[in-house]
Amino acid sequence: YSYCERRGIPITVHCDDQGYRVIAHELAELYTAPERWSRVFTDYPELSVNFAHFGRRYLPAARGDTRERWSRTIVGYMERLPGVYADVAFNGTERAYWNELGSFMAGLSDSAEAVVRRRLLFGSDFLINLTKSQSYLDYVAGFMASGLDQELKSAMLERNPAGFLFGDE
């Protein structure tokens, strides 16, 4: 982390409860949870990290938990730390996701929504998307036809990736 922080090298980490697991689900959930990054960010506050899938949880939340907890944790990091981003790669294979994302963002405070709008990335997961989409064109068309406003879509596709990759926020 020190090496990446000093040189401005961004890191992308998996952050949803799906994927190709080779360990028990409970252990994978523990390793994937964004809260595990708290200690890292204490030691490396300038580290650039993209939480892939924006903490999307597909499986039912455990008792006393919520499906949005991971996403909300990531938003909290975004509010405090300059290098925290999230992408929505793969999430849009279910077209309803775009409306869920819009509702989630609308439920944030104005300041939290503003920082998410500057740090949210489209992402890709190109090959994985093909397992649940008719084609990559269909996946992208779903995003473009979604109810998200054009300013946010442009930011997710252009400005925000430049900020993450090159520090040009």
Image (tube, rainbow, N blue to C red):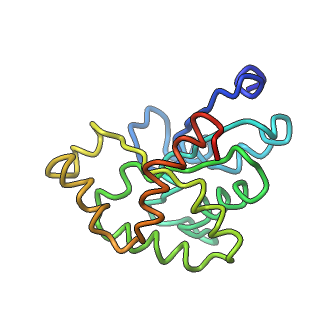
User: Looking at the image, can residue 16 be seen?
Assistant: no
Q: Residue at x 79, y 55 (%)?
A: 80
Residue 52 drawn above or below residue 23: below
Residue 72 drawn above or below residue 12: below
Q: Residue at x 67, y 47 (%)?
A: 84
State left or right for residue 109 relative to residue 125. right
Residue 106 at what x, y percent from top left? 55, 79
Residue 75 at what x, y percent from top left? 66, 61
Location of residue 147 (image quadrant):
bottom left
User: Looking at the image, can residue 138 be seen?
Assistant: yes
State left or right for residue 80 relative to residue 124. right
State left or right for residue 147 relative to residue 80. left
Residue 7 at what x, y percent from top left? 72, 22
- Which quarter of the rendering shows the N terminus? top right
Q: Residue at x 46, y 65 (%)?
A: 151
Q: Residue at x 58, y 70 (%)?
A: 66
Q: Residue furthest left?
A: 134
Residue 91 drawn above or below residue 14: below
Q: Nearer the viewer, residue 93 or 148?
A: 148
Q: How many marks?
A: 0
Q: Residue furthest right?
A: 43
Residue 39 at what x, y percent from top left? 81, 41
